[in-house]
Amino acid sequence: MDEVLTIGQLAQRAGISVSAIRFYEQKGLIDGPPRNRSGYRTYPLKMIEQVRFIKNCRDLGFPLRSVTELLKLCYPEGDEIECAMVQERIQRQHELVLKQFEELNRRRAKLERLLEACPCEGGWPEECDFIRIMLD
Amino acid sequence: MDEVLTIGQLAQRAGISVSAIRFYEQKGLIDGPPRNRSGYRTYPLKMIEQVRFIKNCRDLGFPLRSVTELLKLCYPEGDEIECAMVQERIQRQHELVLKQFEELNRRRAKLERLLEACPCEGGWPEECDFIRIMLD
DNA sequence: CTAAAGCCTAAACCCACTGCAGGGTCAACA
DNA sequence: TGTTGACCCTGCAGTGGGTTTAGGCTTTAG
């Protein structure tokens, strides 16, 4: 039946690229799976969740280094999951995202100032001072 | 007097790193300046504005490829500055930034959902379902 | 005179992948 | 049975925007 997956099937079901999966294996986020007699990787179904977990961490902006740690924390070997540690990572990531937000907001505001600063419809450069704004 | 600058002085006055200036020269954004008898780069004062222009473009999120084009458009050789072209780049960058904004907003919202989802103060992992949220 | 700071080049490193070259394998269809 | 096309394998190069390092020369202040 359908108890193992090729790398392509895993990729599709996890919503990620084949080469990204190989990359994660190379970087040690994913264990190298068993191979069939031709050397093809054969994944158990539960790998879908693991890979989706990685993908979702990435979507949240965590770097791979942190994803590795989050994997250890959330899928520990034998132990209980440690919420406090995970929560702390999420908190810090949230703070980071808020900072990026402010930066992006400044960027947006400045672009909008630049758009307003240039009233040159057909080209009257003498009235236009976006270079002054560009240079702050 | 102060009519030329070393690379370090230029870097400081433009608010950028020394290695970034050398990098921009290597990539062709900046002309290689004259050298003194020991091979040190000697920049005219007007380079401060050029480098600040590049820095501000980068702060707006333009990739170096676009900065090169913006430099040509805003500091043309002999011709008049072409506002319409510049304005178009800025418009497109603005649209890009708005998209990034939405993405960052989704990221923030999900992180906040994760923070709410885990009420484990001292550790009651059985009540915590952030993994479910992590996996969508 | 000497030490620190600053400059030079070339090359390696960072991140998170993607793409390519040059193969092997597998399923379906004629 | 052949063959076509989709898949898989490895290993390496490339991306962007720089930073860091190594190894060496110059300048400046004390």
Image (tube, coloured by chain):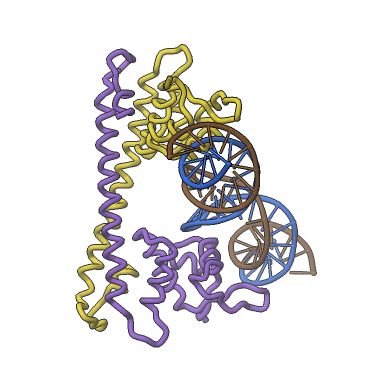
Chain colours: A purple, B yellow, C blue, D brown
Front in this rendered view, residue B14 or B5: B5
- Give percent across and percent down for residue A5: 53, 74
Q: How many marks on residues?
A: 0
Q: Does residue A80 sit above or below B1 in this rendering?
A: below
Front in this rendered view, residue A129 or B84: A129
Residue B110 sits in quarter: bottom left
Residue at 26% over, 58% down: A95
Whether residue B53 is visible here, answered yes or no, is yes
Residue A14 is left or right of residue C7, and the answer is left
Residue at 41% over, 13% down: B80
- Give percent across and percent down for residue B57: 38, 34
Whether residue B132 is visible here, answered yes or no, is no
For the C terminus of chain A, the quadrant is top left
Residue at 41% over, 64% down: A55
Q: Does residue B80 sit above or below C10 in this rendering?
A: above
Residue B73 sits in quarter: top left
- Give percent across and percent down for residue A15: 43, 63
Residue at 31% over, 61% down: A93
Q: Does residue A45 sit above or below A96 in this rendering?
A: below
Residue D12 is left or right of residue A45, and the answer is right
Q: Does residue C13 sit above or below B21 in this rendering?
A: below
- Give percent across and percent down for residue B132: 30, 73
Residue A10 is left or right of residue D4, and the answer is left
Front in this rendered view, residue B101 or A38: B101
Residue A74 is left or right of residue A44, and the answer is left
